[in-house]
Image: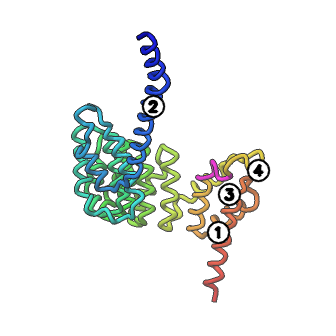
């Protein structure tokens, strides 16, 4: 009997336990493969976000709906803009519900999703969101309205240019330039005197977008700010830290006046940052080509 018990211990130790572990690992592996094989679509993701089909909900009291909202916004980004029309009512309802429930993270990601939809029917909810108490939500709503290019939101974006949150003001003035709001020039000119540098800079760039040189001195100031230069080639991205200057170059190229040309010429010849020199040179060349094209 003692020998029989010893044999069973050996069998248990060297065969049954390892085989059980293998079975568990194989089950986990195939379970993960099944999950990976699922090709989620925005409609299914939206239904999951709203709670339908969430089989863990009875057991998990905090389902992290904001994470689902983030995943949904990324999923929507991979789909063709303008093809989410049937989803908009559900997205707008979820956006408003998140606000009434105080779920700010979810509301922010749904604002991103509404903007990424590229559908004009999403604009009403985003315009409502510009009045949200949360600054990040207002910022994402301003971004979304810019993505949709909703002309009816121009007045709301002009008002957002005086928002208490600097990030919202920055996005609002950027959006007005991106959307070509020529009638909003007075708003952008006032923003040139904003206490926050990013707001002033974006206002100058937006004015250049609509052909107004009122912010040219700021653009020249941006271009004059030294940018980091890698100690050796390949040490870092050559455009790292140069983004403001690169944006200023593009804005100056839109103004096409003598002061802008002179600044672009200086930058193309003497700026220590290679990316800035190259971009300024290309901008100057495009202006020269354009000038030659209009000669009689």
Sequence-first disc among 1 and 3: 1
Taking the spot 33% from the left edge, 53% from the top edge, the residue there is 159
Sequence-first disc among 2 and 3: 2
C-alpha span from label 1 to label 3:
19 Å
Front residue (pair 273, 21): 21
**Mark 2 and mark 1 residues within 8 Å of each other at the beta carbon:** no
Q: Is residue 242 located in the magenta-colored stretch of the structure?
A: yes
Residue at label 3?
276
Nearer the observer: mark 2 or 1; the answer is 2
Residue at label 1?
258
Would you say 98 lies left or right of 225 here?
Answer: left
Residue at label 2?
19
Q: Determine if residue 96 is in view.
A: yes
Nearer the observer: mark 2 or 3; the answer is 2
Sequence-first disc among 2 and 1: 2
The segment highlighted magenta reads 238-243
From the top left corner, tell me how far across and down residue 32 is, in percent.
Answer: 41, 43
Q: Secondary structure at mark 3?
A: helix
Front residue (pair 7, 123): 7
Q: Secondary structure at mark 2?
A: helix
* Above or below, comparing residue 36 to residue 155 in the picture: above
């Amino acid at each position: 009997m003692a020998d029989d018990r010893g044999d069973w211990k050996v069998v248990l130790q060297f065969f049954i336990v390892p085989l059980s572990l293998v079975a568990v690992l194989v089950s986990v592996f195939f379970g993960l493969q099944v999950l990976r094989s699922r090709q989620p679509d925005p409609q299914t993701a939206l239904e999951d976000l709203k709670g339908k089909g969430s089989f863990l909900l009875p057991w998990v009291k905090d389902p992290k709906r904001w994470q689902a909202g983030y995943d949904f916004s990324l999923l929507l980004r991979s789909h063709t803009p303008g093809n989410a029309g049937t989803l908009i009512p559900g997205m707008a309802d979820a956006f408003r519900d998140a606000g009434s429930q105080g779920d700010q993270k979810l509301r922010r990601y749904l604002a991103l999703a509404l903007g990424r939809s590229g559908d004009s029917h999403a604009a009403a909810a985003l315009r409502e969101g510009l009045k949200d108490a949360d600054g990040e939500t207002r910022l994402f709503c301003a971004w979304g309205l810019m993505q949709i290019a909703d002309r009816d939101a121009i007045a709301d974006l002009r008002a957002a240019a005086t928002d208490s949150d600097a990030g919202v003001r920055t996005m609002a003035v950027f959006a007005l330039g991106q959307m070509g709001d020529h009638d909003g020039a007075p708003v952008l000119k006032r923003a040139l005197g904003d206490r926050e540098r990013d707001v002033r800079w974006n206002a100058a760039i937006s004015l250049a977008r609509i052909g107004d040189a009122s912010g040219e001195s700021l653009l020249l100031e941006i271009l004059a700010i030294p940018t980091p230069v890698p100690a050796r080639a390949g040490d870092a991205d050559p455009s790292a830290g140069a983004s403001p200057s690169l944006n200023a170059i593009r804005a100056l190229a839109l103004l096409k006046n003598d002061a802008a040309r002179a600044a672009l010429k200086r930058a193309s010849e003497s700026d220590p940052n290679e990316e800035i020199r190259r971009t300024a040179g290309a901008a100057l060349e495009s202006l020269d080509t354009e000038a030659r094209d209009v000669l009689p």
